[in-house]
Image (spheres, rainbow, N blue to C red):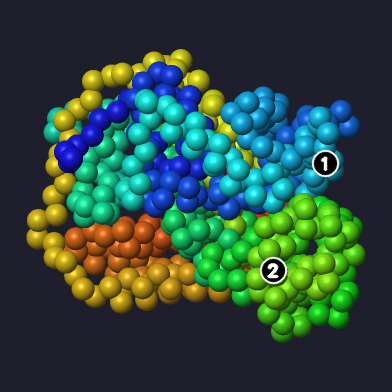
Amino acid sequence: MSNSETSNFLVIGSGIAGLTFALNAAKLGSVTIITKKEKRESNTNYAQGGIASVFSNDDSFESHINDTLIAGAGICNEKRVEILVKEGPIRVKELLNFGAEFTFEGDEIQLRREGGHSHNRIVHANDLTGKEIERVLLQKISENKNIKILENHICVDLLTEHQTINSNFQKRCWGVYALDVNANKIKIFKSNVTILATGGVGQVYLHTTNPLIATGDGIAMSYRAGAKISNMEFIQFHPTSLFNSGSPSFLISEALRGAGAILKNKNGEDFISKYDIRGSLASRDIVARAIDSELKQSGEQYVYLDATHIDKQLLKNTFPNIYDKCLSLKIDITKEMIPVVPAAHYCCGGVYTTENGETSIIGLYAIGEVAMTGVHGANRLASNSLLEALVFSYRAFNKIKEVGDYKTNLPEIKEWNDSGTINNQEWILIAHNRKEIQTLMMDYVGIVRSKIRLERAKDRINLILNEILEFYKRTKVTEELIELRNLAIVANLIISSALSRNESRGLHYILDFPNVDDLNWKKDSFSGVTT
């Protein structure tokens, strides 16, 4: 195979955002999808809960918008939230038309409720919604001759004007350098339009619900290329991951609390009600902080989620994946409480985009979790993430179709040059640095923060990042080294963004400043953009 490939559209990532974009873009031209692992491996595949969307006559767009704004603690982009909510149902119906087998009650879609929602509006496929969405999208992709998927390819860097032979081009993205892991060589992927759909950053933390691939690659690459990055301080910790379930941590869906499960401490007390009148159905940031506080007070390693009062057959039928996983660990959720602990789950910040997925670099779009569209603000409302991926991937496609620059002439790109580098065998350094970053972030930049912890984390991460960059310069690239560099950069961005926000808001809870609930904060408050 040649070291250079060309397509009209290059999609990086194989989750819901990337796959839905590819299916639409294939109507206009050739599409190449690069994924660094097996094509089904994505955050989408691990999504249990579902897609938040207004399908009931009892519900309304206004209610969904209001719930989203409340969760976002005053810094959601209200126009984009309206876009998300109002364009959502038609995008979900497209999945149904593709053949997605969501759960029905008779002729109607069954709707659940999750924390922060005032109505039942979660469309789901029991507790394996993400897996079902991946199944149907990959089936459609396999039937489309205009789409090619390349597995085991990890992107190294974006191609901008600096990598062109004739560097007189304006600031623009022309594709990527990517490592073919199996062939162990760098390839050039040129494209008129590059779509980042690389997912999240969960592996920056020691405990996360994200798969091993979630190393912030798209954000780190965009940052190195000079794109605007924003709101990285807002890292959502899912309140209920199954304690001691390995890495990634097994997620206990918020839908279980929506069905009536109650969080309790070691004494069997419903402690969440002390923190919020909504109890176990409060928004994720509040529940995660309440659990964190309870654990620090008690010295315990976990709290419990009690579903034993819910009908046994309902639990088995509605949450088969959770039931089976817990049973494999000798926990019968119909009879025993589930030990749970918060884990890093979702990044509300990312590559700054317009309402049509455009980044600050021409030819580069970002969709899904890698993007900062503004719809999540300081805290994502449960099950709005899959909806965001659907809505904004379609809007990106429409914008590209309107602009019509997906068939422009492509420049000549400089070949990858790794002369002077060596195959370094000191891989223990990589493993150690990765663990050090994850532990540092968990201890100092977790659910509850302080200025002194953040400043200490900043000093440490700068030392680690400089070590990694020096190692990178003299060593031939590998998958592990690429991910390590990206993790260090993303960790640095999170810490820097957290230090720049001198208030507690949403997921950024810092002991040095009062919570915004106690202040007359402005609705358009927005964190500084990092470039």
Residue 252 location, quadrant: bottom right
Q: Residues within 10 Å of mark 2 (few under 14, many from 20)?
A: many
> Can residue 421 be seen in the rendering of this structure?
yes
Mark 1, secondary structure of its residue: loop
Q: Nearer the viewer, residue 354 or 381?
A: 381
What's the CA distance linking mark 1 and mark 2? 26 Å
Which quarter of the picture shows residue 264?
bottom right
Residue tagged by mark 1?
120
As rendered, which of 403 and 326 lies closer to the eye?
326
- Amino acid found under the numbered disc labelled 1: Asn
Q: Is residue 518 above or below residue 294?
A: above
Amino acid type at image mark 2: Cys
Callout 2: SS: helix
Q: Which x, y percent locates residue 110?
A: 79, 39
Residue at the disc numbered 2: 326
| Left or right, residue 176 beside residue 277 | left
- Residue at the image position 28 percent from the left and 19 percent from the top: 408
